[in-house]
Image (tube, grey):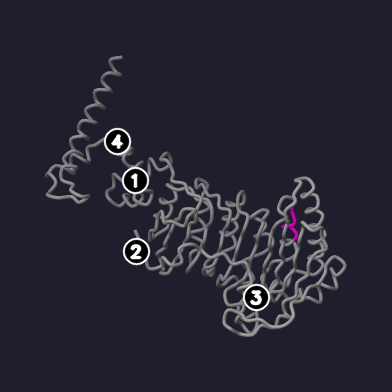
Amino acid sequence: MATHKTEVSHLQAEIDRLRRALTDVCGQIVCGQLTGKMSDNFLEQFSQLPDLPLEQVLHFLPAHQVFQMRHVSRRFNHLIRKCSKTMPKRECNGSVLFKRKHTGELTVEWLDDCDSEILKTTLADDVALSELFRFIRIGGRIFFSDGLSAADDVLDQLSKAWLTIRPELVVFSGDLSKTSQAFLRAFLKKVEPTVKELLFQNADNIGHSLLSDDLIGAAGRLDGLMVLPNGWFWAKDANDVVSDINIGDDTLLSMAEAGRVSSYFCVVDCSGITPGGIRAFIEKWMKQADTYAVAKSIRCELRCELIFCKCANVTPTTVEEACGDLLRKETEAGTDQNIFGDSIDMEERVRYIAKCPSNRRLEILFHFYPFLCPFISPPGLNDEDSDLD
């Protein structure tokens, strides 16, 4: 009992000391601004405060300010590193955007599900990024946008075992020249329990060696997959932009899974996709869709889209030859205009529709125009010039 009383008295003395120090500071704050000078011994008094009340103060600060305080002093650096695992984490199921416009500087922008900004900061190294991740939980959507935003150093930090990360959508639209298979696979394994849509849209330097059936398989069962490299539409030859992306029938067939019957698959320049693989997908999807609809008593439409762009082995002719008995053909005749005002030959827009009951619909399309594909734009596009916190 005596020991307990002594400890209580000691803590009360420390609290009184903290109260006096903070009272001195608060008395000099007017309209949020510090006026006058601090007492000569203020820093000494502050440095003598125990860890416990300082940890409590840190709990009330925004996440980005906590990791920035590591640079205030060695003591804060040690204190934050010590308590980062136990401090409550800020969670939001909105969007996280990574951008890297300059070498060595990574911008992290965090928005809520209404696209209102929660955090926006620029980090100079992966140590600061690691500290930031210790105070947040990432859900919702992840966008790897401008520059080398999905480089190996960023993917490595996102794949750490202690980080909570559960996005439903991941979009790669930056430069992937510094992205390796090993780090990308580790990241996809990390998000595998929750990710439903994986998009490589307008990404630079995808190349033949980065993606593969095995790599995409690390993300598990997907509702949506898109692989459309930047510039593929304007290139005279698809090989000017990509070099036969290494995705084949295995990736396509893996998406025809029970419970994931409403989906889309959109790829460009994948010679590994074959008409035989498409037929196997159609047969599997129709069976799964019928079983799923009956089991769930679904009356609404179950929809699946397969979109192929400049895939060597997949053309309207080869698909009709392999799957004609399962499909009916639709061709939009006449002309239309694209977003640039150019005339479009609508005869190129061939669509095959699987012969399913009325509430199940599978379409195979051959799109030659990028604005016809299901792109997802990152939030905050009009906020590029805003100041960073």
Q: Give the structural element (helix, strand or loop) at label 1.
A: loop
Q: Earlier in the sequence, mark 3 or mark 1?
A: 1
Q: Are marks 1 and 4 in contact (CB under 8 Å)?
A: no
Label 4: few (<14), some (14–19) or many (≥20) C-alpha neighbours in 10 Å: few
Q: Which residue is mark 1?
A: 61
State the residue in front, 97 or 338: 338
Q: Amino acid at mark 2?
A: Asp
213 relative to 353 in the view: left or right: left
The part of the image, by quadrant, that contains residue 129 is bottom left
Q: Residue at x 30, y 45 (%)?
A: 76
Q: Earlier in the sequence, mark 1 or mark 2?
A: 1
36 relative to 292 in the view: left or right: left
258 lies above or below 51: below
Q: Are marks 3 and 1 in contact (CB under 8 Å)?
A: no
Q: Which residue is mark 2?
A: 387
Q: Is residue 106 inside the magenta stretch?
A: no
| Secondary structure mostly seen in the magenta stretch | loop
Q: Earlier in the sequence, mark 2 or mark 4?
A: 4
Give the label, 2 or 3, closer to the camera: 2
Label 1: few (<14), some (14–19) or many (≥20) C-alpha neighbours in 10 Å: few
Give the label, 1 or 4, closer to the camera: 1
Q: Give the structural element (helix, strand or loop) at label 2.
A: loop
Q: Are marks 2 and 3 in contact (CB under 8 Å)?
A: no
Between marks 1 and 2, how big is the CA–CA gap?
Answer: 20 Å
Per the rendering, the mark at residue 243 is 3
Q: Amino acid at mark 1?
A: Leu
Q: Amino acid at mark 4?
A: Pro
